[in-house]
Amino acid sequence: MPNSPFPPSLKVKNSALLVLLLLSGSGFVCSAQTAEELGVSKRSAFDVATERRDPFLPVGWPRPASEPAPVVKGAPAVVTTESYIRPEAFAVSSISLDRIPLAVINGKAYGEGDSLPFVAGDKKIKLIVYSIRDGSVTLRYNDFKVTCPIHVRQKPAEPGKKP
């Protein structure tokens, strides 16, 4: 092979290459052995835990609360920070689902992960824009989430007609 692109040290004779291929493939020719033939004493098992992690929750974020506490009739109402966070408190006027999803909440544009200042009673807190989806925005405060729908504008009345 005078015009070979390989250097002379890498040249291998055809018969040596054939023997090498036969020896490397010999393990694949044998039939597979069962666990009993191999003498396996323990078998692997996969159990799904009841408290499994949500795969869409970012790493390091706290888990959301599983169930709210039951309300007892006749008990005095406890005012918490979460009781102030309601969908009616946020005016979502537009949503853009481009490469970077944005939502206009209370007149300002926010992206996913941005903090939204909010006054809950006499306490100033920061809500996190958790997700922006088509038609709604989810806000998060600690383990509490609230989903705020987009406000649909009414069509303006035609001139001369009363609504």
Image: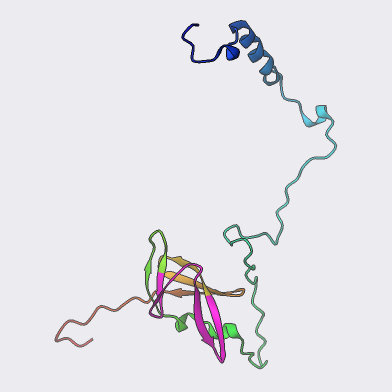
Q: Measured along the vertical axis of the image, is residue 85 above or below residue 121?
A: above
Residue at (79, 31) in percent of width and height: 35
Q: Nearest the camera: 71 or 8? A: 8
Q: Tell whether 69 sits left or right of 42.
A: left
Q: Nearest the camera: 113 or 93? A: 113
Q: Main secondary structure of the magenta part?
A: strand
Q: Nearest the camera: 127 or 66? A: 127
Q: Tell whether 124 sits left or right of 156.
A: right
x and y, in percent, of residue 144 in the image? 59, 75
In this picture, which residue range is highlighted in magenta?
Answer: 103-127
Q: Nearest the camera: 55 or 119? A: 119
Farthest-out residue, left? 160
Residue at (41, 65) in percent of width and height: 134
x and y, in percent, of residue 132 in the image? 45, 67
Q: Measured along the vertical axis of the image, is residue 145 above or below residue 101?
A: below
Q: Quadrant of residue 158?
A: bottom left
Residue at (49, 11) in percent of width and height: 4
x and y, in percent, of residue 85 in the image? 53, 82
| Magenta stretch: includes residue 114 | yes
Q: Tell whether 84 sits left or right of 97.
A: right
Residue at (46, 71) in percent of width and height: 137
